[in-house]
Amino acid sequence: MALLFVTGNANKIAEVRAILAGAIALETRALDIPEIQGPSEEIALDKARRAADIVNGPVLIEDSSLEMNALNGLPGPYIKPFLETLGNQGLNTLLAGFDDKSATAVCTFAFSEGRGCEPVLFQGRLEGRIVPPRGPPRFGWEPIFEYQGETLAEMEMNKKNGLSHRYRALVKFQQWFQGSQQVRDIEN
């Protein structure tokens, strides 16, 4: 049976499928879930609870954030409205008055087994820095996030999918999920 990944973001779907490389079968579904304000972990937990209630079954959700160290972690989980309002150049300009251009890309997955089940979190972090936009603007803020000399947008897809914040979180989830499935198989 396929796992339901709740998102309407085609780029996230493509990346998750590429990273999992068929190890876990995924179905996807977009749901209109209100997003609370707070830290990424609380947002992910809440979204997973709400999604599990809506579908009355197991779900996987994802929340991404971009934490700029000079701005004490902002925009964090509010990166989407910041990006929509300012664009990549505007995000880069936010740090113009600061020497510290370091940032952390954070991906938080939450898995819930279903209605009333407490979600489990899996988080991946990638340390980098904010630079003027480089590379194709395919996916969010990737053109301004540099890791080891290349922005995520400049990287070949396989390279990015083998080191990104999303990759790091998914590896943790995949190990946990496959381990829990093996335990269920043994118990049955």
Image (cartoon, helix red, strand yellow):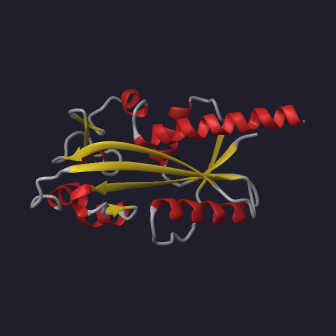
Q: Residue furthest right?
A: 188
Provide residue 147's location: percent of width, then percent of height. 27, 37
Q: Is residue 16 left or right of residue 104?
A: right
Q: Is residue 148 visible?
A: yes
- Quarter containing the N terminus: top right
Residue at x-position 59% and y-position 41%: 173
Provide residue 11's location: percent of width, then percent of height. 45, 45
Taking depth in this image into account, of 75 and 27 the one nearest to the observer is 75
Q: Find residue 88 and report its image quarter.
A: bottom left
Residue at x-position 38% and y-position 31%: 157
Residue 19 vertical position relative to residue 35 in the rendered view, above or below: above
Provide residue 184's location: percent of width, then percent of height. 82, 38
Residue at x-position 50% and y-position 72%: 36
Residue at x-position 18% and y-position 55%: 92
Q: Is residue 177 left or right of residue 159?
A: right
- Quarter containing the C terminus: top right
Q: Is residue 31 visible?
A: no
Provide residue 64's location: percent of width, then percent of height. 43, 53
Q: Find residue 32 and report its image quarter.
A: bottom right
Residue 78 vertical position relative to residue 188 in the rendered view, above or below: below
